[in-house]
Every structure is written in structure tokens, then in C-alpha cells.
Amino acid sequence: MKRSVLLAVLCLWMTAAFAAAETPPLEIGSRLELFVDHYLIERLDGQARLELQNPQLVPGPDDAPPQEIWASVIKDGSLYRMYVRGRKDPRVSWRTHSLEEHYLNHVLLYFESDDGVHWTAPDLGLYDVPRYPAGNVIMADEFGVEQTFAAFLDNRPGIEPSERFKGIGGKHYPDRVRKELEAKYGPHGLRAYASADGIHWRPLQKAPVIPGDWGNLDSQNVAFWSEAEEQYVCYFRVSRG
């Protein structure tokens, strides 16, 4: 009887061992994987569990940058860099003025911080915009680029130091004014910019890298180098119907 029980246990152990050998570990290579579900988890023992953390709102300081719908924040070493759209004249909008005046009214503002909470507006002396006497305007008169500009730190392997920072911005022109605006400012769409220091920006090419007909392009169009896809990726809004 004992011999039969021992053989049965041995058979069960061998069956489990062969089953484990037939189910190799999931191969993820060097990719980063978030534990957002149980896909990569074989088991959770004891009190171990998956738990989403709740972000805590930090009280804004007195020198907080102006709220202009959206911004890009980059952690560059020990320095935080923020890019925020601004307006030369707060009274100008697409509701009260032409689209051309609306697009030309925007500028790109730059702020710095050591802790991500307290920010300074450095006097860079690049543009003279009366509404922003601090001197932290780093882009103007790029026709719509400043309104949707989103910056990122380019992590592509082998990137040139002169292109360490990238950014995209631009607009989709409505049909009623497309011919007029394209005749003056070129094809609509998202244009790519590069910078060595995150402050002085230059266009990478004249033509848009994402055509204006692909989407609305009227919000923060987020782009970055994706290590998983090994290519640049961009997210933007599209309306159907």
C-alpha cells in the first residue's frame, strides 16, 4: 500500500514538473512592463496584492506658471523644464477674431524648477512680448505651432546632442480657410522641432511630419521615442462623423 502511494505521489510530481517545463517563462526581453494586471504574475503569496496608488495634489505656490489648458514637463537631470502656451493678447480668440489672428496670437513660455513645485521664469531675452515682461518667451510667430506645442526628451539611442530635445506643434486648417492659410504659411499639420538645450528651437524640416488631414490636431499632441516599438509615436485627437 505504501509503495502504491509513493508511486502515485511520484507520478503527480513528475506530471507537474513536465507541465512546468512545457510552460516557459514569458519572454519580455529588455522591455519595461507595468504590473497593471496578472499577465506577468504567476502567483501572489501572503498579503501581496496589486494596488493602484492615489496621486496627491500639491498646493500650488505663489509663483506657479499661468494656467493655459496644457503644458509639457520634462525632468532633465536634476532640473524640471515646463513648456506652457501663452497669448500675446488675452482678448484675442477664435470666437472673436479670425483664425489667422488667433493662431498668430500664441507664444511658447518656458519655466524651470528644482523640485517640480516651485517654478521660475528665467529672463532669456529672446522675444519682447509686453504681456510677459519676465522674458521667458522662447517661441513666437510660428503660426499655430506654439498653441499645441508638446516637448519631450528624445531617448532614441545615438541621438545627436543638438537634437536632444524634440517637440511637435501645428494645426489642422478648416476647409473654409485652408487654401488661404496654406498659401501664406504652407501645408497644415504637425511640424517637428529640435533643440540642444530645450530653450532654442529650430524646425527640422519645412513640411509637416504629420499631415493636417490625419486628425483634429487641436489639443496636446503627445509624441515620444518608444523603446518597445523602436520608433517615434504620436497621440492626437480625431473626430469621426
Image (spheres, rainbow, N blue to C red):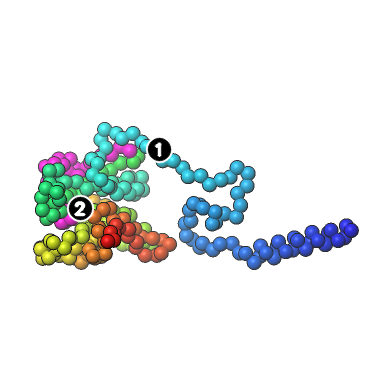
Q: With respect to residue 157, does 44 lie above or below?
A: above
Amino acid type at circle 1 is Gln
| Circle on res. 116 | none
Q: Which residue lies furthest to the right in this view?
A: 1
Q: Which of the pair 8/113 is nearer the observer?
A: 8
Is there a contact, CB below 8 Å, between mark 1 and mark 2?
Answer: no
Quarter of the image where the N terminus is located: bottom right
Whether residue 42 is visible: yes
In the picture of the structure, the residue carrying the numbered disc 1 is 56
Disc 1 to disc 2, C-alpha distance? 30 Å
* Region rendered in magenta: 117-144
**Residue at image coords 54%, 57%:** 39
In the picture of the structure, the residue carrying the numbered disc 2 is 146
The mark tally for this picture is: 2
Q: Which of marks 1 and 2 is nearer the N terminus?
A: 1
> Where does residue 145 sit, x and y in percent of width and height?
20, 56
Label 2 SS = helix
Amino acid type at circle 2 is Glu
Q: With respect to residue 108, does 212 lie above or below?
A: below
Lateral position of residue 89 relative to residue 108, left or right: left
> Where does residue 120 sit, x and y in percent of width and height?
25, 39
Whether residue 138 is visible: no
Lateral position of residue 60 relative to residue 134, left or right: right
